[in-house]
Amino acid sequence: MKVVVTGASGFIGRYVLTELEKYQVDVTVVTRDTARLEGLELSCGIVEMDLALPSADCFDLLGRPDVLIHLAWDGLPNYKSLHHFETELPRQFNFLNRMIEAGLPSLLVTGTCFEYGMQSGALAADLNTKPNNPYGYAKDALRQQLEFLKLHNNFNLTWARLFYMYGDGQPSTSLYPKLKEAVLNKELVFNMSGGEQLRDYLPVHDVARQIVQLAVNHNDVRTVNICSGNPISVRRLVEQWVSDNNWDIKLNLGYYPYPDYEPMAFWGERQILEKV
């Protein structure tokens, strides 16, 4: 089986590559700059390609893969930027459309829990989407475009909607690396929000494992949540990180306001994932 991975140099991508090593598959990584793959011990092929300007024969250049795991998306973590639907959405669709029309048999694309918008509680994968920021809107629009493509092309589609995750190598703007940096800097307190919001968190290696399992099995499950299914307060999660690592730092709760682009309590349902 031939597997192509985009976005492999990113936080999730690096763990996906590690997970793919457990399978008997030929892996090819797509990057617009090989320097981005520095530090990775890769036992796979590398193709330099700018997804914003894919060649007409990109499917052939990538070795006519059996599966494409598409993780790439530029413009994060600025969820409110118009770049997501003005620039990124058409670029993404153009590349995926070319791959599908050339004969790609199976596609897995990572979505986002922001597609649900301000809906609260347990969110099922088949719940109607109501995105309320440009990033969530653009991702949801891409999903719908791919669904329309399925009416005219025979390919398997899995839309893997991601919730929250943490782990080493995460961008410095995220909660876990910020906490870790504060500890390394020997700061006495860690400034954060009130921490009462309920979220759905998974270690990134669990996220990667679920993505790879879905991809290599050629599933055509459409939309599925990659989540724990268990809500946890952000305060409790941070306290757990501090305890598990024996870190000596106190939490300064309420320093930051709660984000205005997400509800206070939401988490994913795993019903479809568990069926698969």
Image (tube, rainbow, N blue to C red):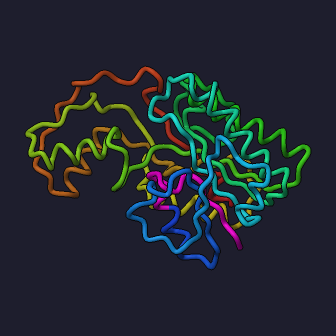
Instruction: Work out whether residue 214 or residue 10 is closer to the camera in this orientation and state it.
Output: 10
Q: Which quadrant of the figure contains the C terminus?
A: bottom right
> What span is colored magenta in the figure?
1-15
- Residue beneath the point at 59% across and 56% down: 48
Query: Residue 154 lies in what quarter of the image?
Result: bottom right
Residue 86 locus on image (x, y percent)? 63, 24
- Residue beneath the point at 64% across and 30% down: 138
Residue 157 locus on image (x, y percent)? 75, 52
Residue 51 locus on image (x, y percent)? 64, 46
Q: Is residue 92 left or right of residue 7?
A: right
From this viewpoint, which residue is outermost toward the right? 152
Q: Is residue 253 above or below residue 60?
A: above
The question of residue 259 being in magenta is answered with: no
Instruction: Work out whether residue 226 or residue 85 is closer to the camera in this orientation and state it.
Output: 85
Q: Which quadrant of the figure contains the N terminus?
A: bottom right
Instruction: Work out whether residue 138 or residue 253 is closer to the camera in this orientation and state it.
Output: 138
- Residue beneath the point at 70% across and 31% down: 141
